[in-house]
Image (cartoon, rainbow, N blue to C red):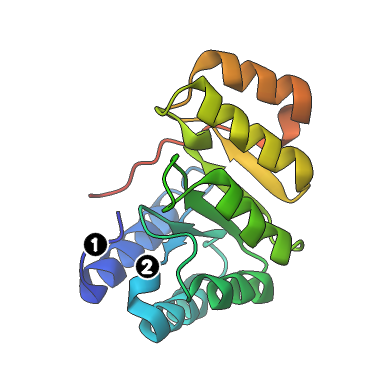
Amino acid sequence: SGGNYLEQLKANNNFNLNAAIDYPNRIIPFVYFDPRFEEDGLQEIDRCMENGSDYYKGIKIGHKYAVARYMYPMMEKAEEFGLVVGIHSDASIRGHPYIIADLANSFPKVTTVILHMTGRMGAAAEMLSIKAAEKNPNVWLETCFSNPFPVKKAVEILGPDRIMFGSDSSNS
């Protein structure tokens, strides 16, 4: 998680960058973005890229609203820096795969990952993530917390190149 306060989020981003520096080719850090911090959150992306553009490969959005007003400016930053965007998904309005796919559709140059493939909500919800990726070639699926059958179907429908496993783990 990025933290409940901007300073906590910055400290976590620094921790992840330092881990990648200490363990090259083993850790791929993403900048944690929280749309609640609005302009400060966008400035945090800039700060991280100024200090670690050789290491940061993406932006992660956790359990926040995928439709928050600062998600579009964040996607513009991702496109500017050539970063992947990973967004927490679930079956709520907060992180529904169709909301994430709509955001990705507005930014076709940004590879957008539906984290968890809407996992732990049941196979039917996970199948919605597959459908969202089917309609948007820039959408990939990450499978931690997902059920085996939808993962198998995702590989069959999308191919293995757009499916990934992530640990969803950091220092907190």
Type of amino acid under label 1: Gly
Q: Is residue 116 left or right of residue 112?
A: left
Task: Report the disc number at residue 77.
Answer: none
- State left or right for residue 139 relative to residue 142: right
Taking depth in this image into account, of 103 and 39 the one nearest to the observer is 103
**Label 2 residue SS:** loop
Residue 155 as seen in the image, left or right of residue 114: right
Q: Residue furthest front?
A: 93
Determine which quarter of the picture holds residue 62: bottom left
Q: Nearer the viewer, residue 100 or 44?
A: 100
Are circles 2 and 1 on residues that touch, CB within 8 Å? yes
Which amino acid type is shown beneath numbered disc 2? Asp
Q: Which mark is residue 34?
A: 2
Residue matched to label 1: 3
In which quarter of the view is residue 18 placed? bottom left
Crowdedness near tag 2: few (<14), some (14–19) or many (≥20) residues, C-alpha within 10 Å? many
Mark 1 surroundings: few (<14), some (14-19) or many (≥20) residues within 10 A: some
**Residue 115 point in image, percent of width and height:** 50, 42
Q: Nearer the viewer, residue 102 or 62?
A: 102
